[in-house]
Image (cartoon, rainbow, N blue to C red):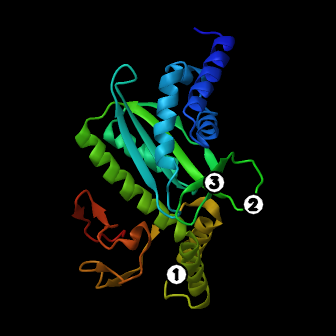
């Protein structure tokens, strides 16, 4: 096992290799990207390999329009690989890492390294990088960007294509959930107010319990990813729920996403539902 002096030397050599490429802001990007990496992660690469990975990730990072994620998936062969490197650059928001790792687990990908620095970035109106800084630097005109850098055991080209499509869909859902978070909270507040001010004809104990539960959800005990209104018609034997048009928020903006289902089939409306 290399000692700490060896690790320090490796980091210095890697920094010198990136500096040799003479690409503006690359050295700063490389330092921020691998700042949270364990030394064992660094020792897996030579200084030249480290510089190559950073330079190719940076090449994708340096142009990105705010509001749109950018996904880069590269395969590496020996001596650097076999390895697949996934870089995802996005506006900083919740759920990004969890959603990405959940998708990789669904793919059965063997995850070898996960880095997620939050960078402060200045870009031109066209999305060209002007400068990049650490998350704690206090400068005006900077925006926070998420930088996910993930190494997995090598995927074939078809799997890379499917993964890219999956990531694009997942990031779209994350953005929808984050943008509609306050709207979902507001709709729940309206429901609570409606039940209190115009109570439906149900037993008082049931109504009190229901309102208390909704208030508990609202008090930061639940993560709202999607919300949709349904209209109920019929009775316990023949009742049905139908979605209210244009009522979807968050991930349930998509009308094709079913809520009341079991597997690929719609669930029957039971008395409990």
Q: Is residue 55 visible?
A: yes
Crowd around label 2: few <14 · some 14–19 · many ≥20 (10 Å): few
Residue drawn at the location 54% of the way across and 46% of the way down: 147
Q: Position of residue 224 (x, y in %)?
A: 52, 64
Gap between marks 1 and 2, in whole Å? 57 Å
**Which secondary structure lies at badge 3?**
strand
Q: Where's the N terminus, which quadrant?
A: top right
Q: Earlier in the sequence, mark 1 or mark 3?
A: 3
> Are the residues flagged by discs 1 and 2 in contact, CB closer than 8 Å?
no
Gap between marks 1 and 3, in whole Å? 56 Å
Along the line of sight, the residue nearer the viewer: 237 or 69: 69
Q: Quadrant of residue 108?
A: top left
Along the line of sight, the residue nearer the viewer: 4 or 104: 4
Gap between marks 2 and 3, in whole Å? 10 Å
Labelled disc at residue 203: 1
Residue drawn at the location 50% of the way across and 51% of the way down: 89
- Foreground tag (1 vs 3): 3
All told, the count of numbered labels is: 3
Q: Where is residue 49 in the image (x, y as percent from the top left)?
A: 47, 25
Which residue is denoted by mark 3 in the rendering?
A: 121
Crowd around label 1: few <14 · some 14–19 · many ≥20 (10 Å): few
Labelled disc at residue 140: 2
Q: Position of residue 230 (x, y in %)?
A: 38, 80
In-image side of 149 versus 4 (left or right)? left
User: Can you say whether 105 is above or below 209 in the image?
Assistant: above
In-image side of 68 versus 22 (left or right)? left
Q: Quadrant of residue 73?
A: top left
């Amino acid at each position: 096992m290399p000692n700490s002096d060896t690790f320090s030397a490796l980091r210095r050599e890697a920094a010198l290799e990136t500096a040799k490429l003479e690409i503006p802001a690359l050295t700063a990007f490389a330092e921020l990207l691998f700042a949270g990496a364990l030394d064992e992660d660094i020792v897996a690469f030579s200084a030249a390999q480290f510089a190559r990975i950073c330079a190719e990730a940076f090449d994708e990072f340096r142009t990105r329009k705010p509001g749109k994620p950018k996904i880069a998936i590269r395969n590496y062969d020996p001596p650097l690989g076999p390895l697949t490197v996934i870089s995802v650059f996005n506006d900083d928001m919740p759920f990004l890492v969890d959603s990405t790792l959940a998708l990789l687990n669904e793919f059965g990908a063997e995850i070898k390294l996960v880095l997620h620095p939050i960078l402060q970035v200045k870009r031109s109106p066209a999305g060209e990088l002007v400068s990049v800084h650490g998350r704690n630097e206090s400068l005006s005109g900077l925006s926070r960007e998420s930088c996910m850098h993930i190494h997995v055991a090598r995927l074939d080209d078809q799997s890379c294509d499917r993964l890219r499509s999956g990531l694009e869909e997942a990031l779209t859902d994350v953005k929808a959930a984050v943008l509609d978070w306050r709207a979902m909270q507001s709709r729940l507040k309206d429901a609570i107010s409606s039940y209190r001010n115009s109570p439906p004809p149900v037993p008082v104990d049931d109504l009190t319990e229901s309102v208390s539960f909704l208030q508990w959800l609202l008090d930061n005990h639940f993560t709202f990813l999607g919300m949709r209104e349904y209209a109920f018609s019929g009775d316990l034997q023949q009742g049905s729920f139908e979605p209210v048009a244009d009522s979807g928020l968050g991930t349930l903006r998509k009308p094709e996403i079913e809520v009341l289902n079991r597997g690929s089939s719609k669930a029957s409306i039971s008395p409990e539902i």
